[in-house]
Amino acid sequence: MMDKLYLVARIADTRVALRSRSIHSVVAVGTPVEVPAAPPHVSGLFALRSRVFTLIDPHVVVGLPAVPVAPGQRVVVVDVAEHGYALLADEIEDVCFIDAPETRITGRLLPGWARVAEALIEHEGQSLLVVDPSHFITLPVQKAA
Amino acid sequence: MGRTGTAMDDLLNDFLAETAEILAEAGGALVAWETDPADRAQLDAIFRLVHTIKGSSGFLSLPRVTALSHAAEDALDQVRRGHRSADAALVTGVLAIIDRLSQLCTTLGQEGVEPPGEDGDVIGALIPVDEAPAKAADMPEIRLRREDDLSTDLQGWRSIRVPLPLLDSVMTGVTDIVLARNEFARMLRDSGANPSLIASFDRLSDSIAGMRQSVSQMRMQRIDKLFAPLPRIVRDLARDLGKKIRFATSGGEVELDREMMENIRDPLIHIVRNAIDHGIEKLDDRVAAGKDVTATILVSARQSGNQIEIEVRDDGRGMSPDALVAKAVASRLLTATDARALTPKEKLELVFRPGFSTAAKVTSISGRGVGMDIVKANVEKIGGIVELRNDEGRGLAVVLRVPMTLTIISGLMVRAAGQYFAIPRGSVREILLETSDSVRIERVGGGELVNVRGQQFPLLRLETILGRARDDRDDIEDRALVLVQPGQGQSYALSVAAIHDHEELVIKPAAPIIMATGLYAGTTLPDNGRPVLLLDVQGIVAAAAIDASETGRQMDRTVEAEAAASAARNAAQLLLFRDTNGRTRGVRLSVIERVEEIPAPALFESAGRVQARIGEDIFPVHAAALPDGQGAVKLLRLHDGHSVLCYPIDTVIDIVRLPEAVLPAAVPGLIAGVVLVAGDPVELIDPFWLMEQYATGAAALSVRPPVCRIAEDHDGWGSSFLAPILRNAGYRVVSETSDEAADILLCLTGDSAACAHGGGDLPVIRLRTSVAAASPEDDTVYRYDRAGLLDALRRRVGGTRA
């Protein structure tokens, strides 16, 4: 049952579906604190219930320019390897039960999206990319070149 | 059914955890007892430990564990009743039982049931050879509960076992409460609430602060636990290698965060093994070197500030810098040219290079691919440092200096680029304003360096390191230099926009992508609820690609300057506290061993004096009467190198630099004088006077025999002929090369030019070889004039003593 539950959100200007079991929660972000010299997709740190979360800007991960964080903006909180991260979401739509099966991605995606997307799923007459939030955490190694 | 199952599982888990601890402790205690079988207290302690295992295992119906512990208990009881003497065979037998119990417990933990098997072998080994058959025929006796049984139970009640995740969750909970309190405090201030509301909120606030303190204390454990397995390791290894080693520990009451403890357990064991295997010479070599056949390894712990120093000292051969270099060159870690440029200290530190192993051949004991490089890496991972104090031919001391807790450190908050950062207080040497007179900033070849009172430091600007622009709002007058000491013999100046304050910080690791920058050591949440990054002072050195090493910075004066700087740092700090009478007072930080918080009932009055029981020790307390009320009492533990005196205080206020100007008191007494700290008068406690008041009591506890040092003993006459006579007469004898403080110098040559420098202000007695005195003024003593010599000694040493 849980397998079929998805969070539908707009991330990096694109509607995507996130498997609900990969998500910890959705919260509103306070004012983040910058991390100088950190990789470009790290927007900063913020505290939530005495835990410190690293804020990730998905725009940068898929190759778009970074966007400023608005106070109160909603973020998708995920735990990866015992560290807390939050993905900035442009918009959180809904948590819904999608019965359709996940299908293989057909067609060519932009390199940024190709790295984070795992499958396609049909929802209300539209194809959504199913993304794994943990792929947003690290940037591809070619950055260094 | 399921319910009882879980209850049983819980019981079993408790039993296993408890037993593992007991077994470790018992192993250590047994070895200590073996060396001194007359130590009744030690025997009783071991008996109780084994008895506890037997008791709990009977309840859980674990027949093998019960039988084993019963056999050990029985054998020990025989000794307690004087029916049997303690010998190596008995100790080995009991140790074998302890090993078997450990194996059983491991299996129990994995499978949940006691594995079938036969323990007749180890139990049989305990039966004394001569009376083996007779023993079996003994009538089983029914014993009543004895004193020991009762005390075991009592101790069980004093503490409880709490799973670590639960402690962590309490810690997180309390941190949450603190953050919520701060939020609430802000709202309360903004809303202009009435004073009575604010007052009662403050009371809540205080109790939350107290609770946070207690929770962090809950995570602390006595370092005894870390030392417990060591005696056993030393005994077994020494036996395997055919070496004789006396092992001792001290400072077991020092407390350390249990997580830290986990992290230094392996490095510590490794260092001890190294000392036994490589440090301590073979018996013949020790005899040849004129050393006591029995070597000594001493492991001691000491708290200084919020750091813990653990020292493993042996009296073995030490390390030879030249041998290390030869080895490093041979294993191609270093070219011969580079080697020549190394200082003696750098040569020693070659052992920390990966791939370096000092043993001429790989042994099964310490040469297992785990080198000192791993030890160093592990200790540095938790923010600690490893230091070597080598005395070639006479021994080596390896010192681990680690922060007291991983999670809570004292941090200095600084500002740069409009943002706050934390610097671990432990690595801050000094803070200066850039505008200060003693600071001179120079630009050299595009880089910057700063000259502070004649000492040069590379200068790094925090904004530059972080790749940020300076914040326009910063006042140039606020810019400050933090002299940072990232490790031994390293230092640099970090320029920041402003110094904020210092706070106790709860440190959490940052996400790996942030740690990968190499600039940060973690994140923390100060009371305002906004995350702050903790700077990695060592990583900054690497990121800025500077040479922070102090070597050669100052030509010839480096060593003295370093010593002077560290002396100044230690000596010139003042601990401010509120005394029990409400006055603000200060005492030099260097005389304080630690601040102790003990429950009021641990204070008692005896022989007209207030005393405090801390752990296993009793210390005098500077107080006229017992404090009334229950609660906890804070004590400053003053230490003069020999004895300890506790000084009760109300609360610690701050640590500040001791001002230069002291207005001395008119008469000697508790108050040495008055100083001004931030414009307020502070009474300075006179530790000298205090110690003097209690000195007689302390001296009675540890009567130290006068120490004679024998000098100019070229032919060994002193050590072979003279020393035994002196020892018989109740003196302690040390050789010329020993650095132990002596009370008198015995010079084995009548030549008055010799020993003139060595004596210092020590009294000197010269021995001459001729029967007749050279002249009437000759104050030398004929060396076979026993009575004359002892008389001279009594006059110089015995007379001044007593």
Image: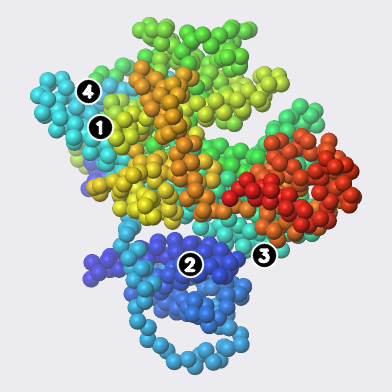
In the rendered structure, the residue with mark 1 lies on which chain?
B
Tell me the distance, in whole angstroms, between the alpha carbons under discs 4 and 1.
Answer: 19 Å
Judged from the image, the secondary structure of the residue bearing numbered disc 3 is helix
Tell me the distance, in whole angstroms, between the alpha carbons under discs 2 and 3.
Answer: 25 Å
**Would you name the residue on which mark 3 appears?**
B239
Residue B471 or residue B701, whichever sits in front: B701
**Would you name the residue on which mark 4 appears?**
A72
Q: Quadrant of residue B330?
A: top right
**Would you name the residue on which mark 1 appears?**
B179
- Circles 3 and 4: CB distance less than 8 Å? no
**Badge nearest the viewer, 3 or 4:** 3
Task: Identify the mark at residue B207; answer none if there is no mark.
Answer: none
Residue B587 or residue A130, whichever sits in front: B587
Dots 1 and 2 on the same chain: yes
**Badge nearest the viewer, 2 or 3:** 2
Q: Residue at x 59, y 31 (%)?
A: B488
Q: Amino acid at mark 1?
A: Leu
Dots 2 and 3 on the same chain: yes
Disc 3: CA contacts within 10 A as few (<14), some (14-19) or many (>=20): few
Judged from the image, the secondary structure of the residue bearing numbered disc 4 is loop
Q: How many marks?
A: 4
